[in-house]
Amino acid sequence: MKISTRELLYGALLTAISLLIPLAFRGWLQIVIPPFSATLGSHVAVMLAMFVSPLVAAAVGVGSTIGFFVTLTPVIAARASIHIVFGVLGALLYRRGAKPWQVFVITAPVHALGEALVVIPFGFPLYAALITVGVGTLLHHVVDATIALSLYFSLRKAGLSLNPPHAPR
Amino acid sequence: MLTNVTLGQYFPGASVAHRLDPRTKLGMSFAYIMVLFIATSWLSYSVLGLASLLVVWLSQVPVKMVLRGLRPILMILSLTVVLHVFTSREGVELVSLWFVRIYSGGVRQGFLLAFRLVLLVLSTSVLTLTTSPIALTDALEVALRPLRRFGVPAHELAMMMTIALRFIPTLLEEAEKIMKAQLARGADFESGGLLKRAKSLLPLLIPLFISAFRRADELAMAMEARCYRGGEGRTKYKILKYSSLDAYAVASFVVISAVALAL
C-alpha cells in the first residue's frame, strides 16, 4: 500500500480537524445523554476522507483513534477506532460508484453497531451500550452526514478535488 | 466559544516515568490493559491498583492532574455500578425492599468493572502525562513497524499524526479568525437549539476545510520539492534509545503482572 504525499497531507489535515472539532467545540456542540456523549460535527472529517481514498479514510480513522488515546480517554479512543471500519467501507462504496448520500446511509448502521459493541468491554451494560450509544451514534451520524454532504458539494463548487492526483514516488 | 485546547496532557518533568523510553511505556501500557482484562479477582485488582499508585507517585505528576482524567468517565462509572447492582440476580440476596432486590454478585460485579475502568484510565493518563505527543507518535511508528510486511504504511501513519498534531493550533487559530469574520457579517453561532447550531457550523466549516485542503496542497508541493520520498532510508533527528531503567521497569512490570494474575 503506497500513499502519495498529497494523500498523506490530506489525511494529516483531516486528522487534525477530526481531533480539533471535538476538542474545541465540546462545550458548544456537545450532546450528553449519559453514558453517551458526542460532539456534533466530529465525524465530518472522516466522512470527507471517504471521498479521498480508502487508505486516507483508514488513516484518518487510525489518526483520530491515536489522537483521542493521546488526548482523551481510552473509551473515546475505542469508539473512534470504529471510524476506521466505517470510513474504509464508505470509501470502498464510493469507489464502486455509490453516491455520497448512499455511502452515508449504508455506513450508518455499521457505525452505530460498532460504537455500541466496542464500549461493552469497558463495562458498559448491554442496554446502555445498544440503546444509548447505538441509537445516539445513529442520530449523530445522520446530522454529521448532512453537514458532510453540504461540505462535499461546497468544496466541489470551490474547485477543490477530493481525489488528489497520485504524486510520483 | 472555542474552548482552550490542550493537546495531550503532557506534564513536563524528569521523573523515572518521564525518563523511560516511550516504546517501553507504550508497550507496558498495552500489556497492563491486557492484564486488567484477564484479571478477575479483587486481590488481583488490589495488586494492580497498588502498582498504579506507585507509578503515579514515581511520575511526580500532581495527583489532581491524574485524577482529572477520571472526570469524563464519572457518569459511566456510576451507571455501571447502579445497573449491575439493581439488575443482577447472582449471589446472595442482600436487600429486599418492595420491588428492589440487591444481590451480592451484582454489587461485586458493578464495583469490579468500575474499578477496572478507573485503573484503565489511570494507566493511560500516566502514559500521556509523562510522554509528549511527538514521542508517543515515534513510539507508535516503531510499534506499527512489524505491520509493514502486511502493507501497513507505518512511517506514513506516524508522519500523518505528527503533522496533524503540529497543525491543530494553526487550524484552531484559523477557525477563530473565520468565526470572528462570520460574526462580523452577522452570523449567529450561539442561539437556537442543537440543530440550528449544527447548521450554523457550515459558514465556519466550509472556509476551514477549503483552507485546510489548500494548505495540504501547498505542503505536499513543498515536501516533494525537498525530495520527501516516504519512510525508506529516512533518518531521525532524535533517536530513541533504551536504557537500564527500561530493563528494570519491564522486569518489575512482569513480576507485578505475574503476581496479580496468580492471585
Image (cartoon, coloured by chain):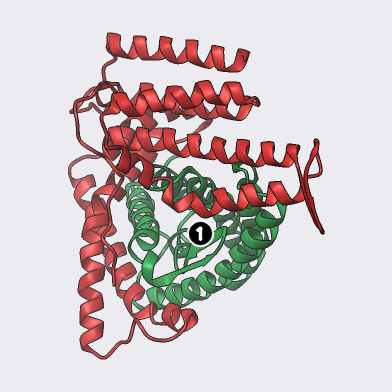
Chain colours: A green, B red
From the viewer's side, name the closer residue of A44 and B82: B82
Q: Position of residue B143 (x, y in %)?
A: 42, 27
Which chain does the numbered disc 1 sit on?
A: A
Q: Position of residue B82 (x, y in %)?
A: 65, 51
Instruction: Look at the picture and state if B105 lies above or below B212.
Output: above
Q: Position of residue B64 (x, y in %)?
A: 31, 43
Q: Position of residue A154 (x, y in %)?
A: 40, 78
Residue at the spot 20% in from the left edge and 73% down from the top edge: B177
Judging by the rendered image, the residue that carries numbered circle 1 is A50
- Quadrant of the rendered structure where residue B126 is? top left
- Residue, far bottom: B186
- Quadrant of the rendered structure where residue B25 is? top left
Instruction: Give the total of numbered labels.
Output: 1
Instruction: Look at the picture and state if A59 lies above or below B136.
Output: below
Quadrant location, the C terminus of chain B:
top right
From the viewer's side, name the closer residue of B83 and A164: B83
| Three-letter amino acid code at the position of disc 1 | Met
* Residue B71 seen in render: yes
Residue at the spot 34% in from the left edge and 44% down from the top edge: B161
From the viewer's side, name the closer residue of A47 and B27: B27
Mark 1, other Cα within 10 Å: few <14 / some 14–19 / many ≥20:
many
Residue at the spot 68% in from the left edge and 51% down from the top edge: B83
Instruction: Look at the picture and state if A82 lies above or below B178.
Output: above
Residue at the spot 43% in from the left edge and 36% down from the top edge: B122
Considering the numbered disc 1 on the image, is that residue within a helix, a strand or a loop? loop
